[in-house]
Image (cartoon, rainbow, N blue to C red):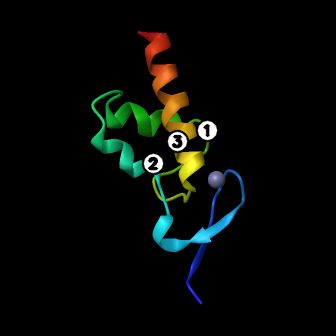
Amino acid sequence: MAKQAMCKRCQQKFEIKYIYTIQQFQYRKTPPYQWTVEFFAKQNIGEWDSFCESCIIHYQKISLDEFESIK
Ligand SMILES: [Zn+2]
């Protein structure tokens, strides 16, 4: 049986190969990754927390929205 991970946000289990973390945000241009790490730290989310695809898309959106709103 494939190894499973659990999404920290929605608590759904999924195959470990589909795991996402906020570390993938280091590849986007805005916001800067350092800003992103601090934004999620305030929400008690660290670089090693696991998320499913739909939850990481949610976080991608709210972090970008927050960054745009404070400019
Ligand atoms: Zn999830």
Question: Mark 3 — residue?
Answer: 57
Q: Position of residue 12 (x, y in %)?
A: 70, 62
Q: CA distance from mark 1 to mark 2?
A: 12 Å
Which dot, 3 or 1, sits closer to the camera?
Answer: 3
**Residue 37 picture quarter:** top left
Q: Position of residue 4 (x, y in %)?
A: 60, 76
Crowding around mark 1 (Cα neighbors within 10 Å: few <14, some 14 to 19, many 20+) is few
Q: Earlier in the sequence, mark 1 or mark 2?
A: 2
Amino acid identity at mark 2: Ile
Residue 15, x across and y down, in percent: 56, 73
Residue flagged by tag 3: what amino acid is it?
Ile
Measuring 61% from the left and 44% from the top, which residue is drawn there? 44
In the image: residue 50, left or right of residue 24: right
Residue type of the residue flagged with mark 1: Gln
- The residue under label 2 is 22
Q: Is residue 32 visible?
A: yes
Q: Is residue 71 left or right of residue 39?
A: left
Dot label at residue 43: 1
Precedes in sequence: disc 2 or disc 3: 2
Report the residue at 71% width, 53% height from top: 10
Q: Is residue 41 visible?
A: no
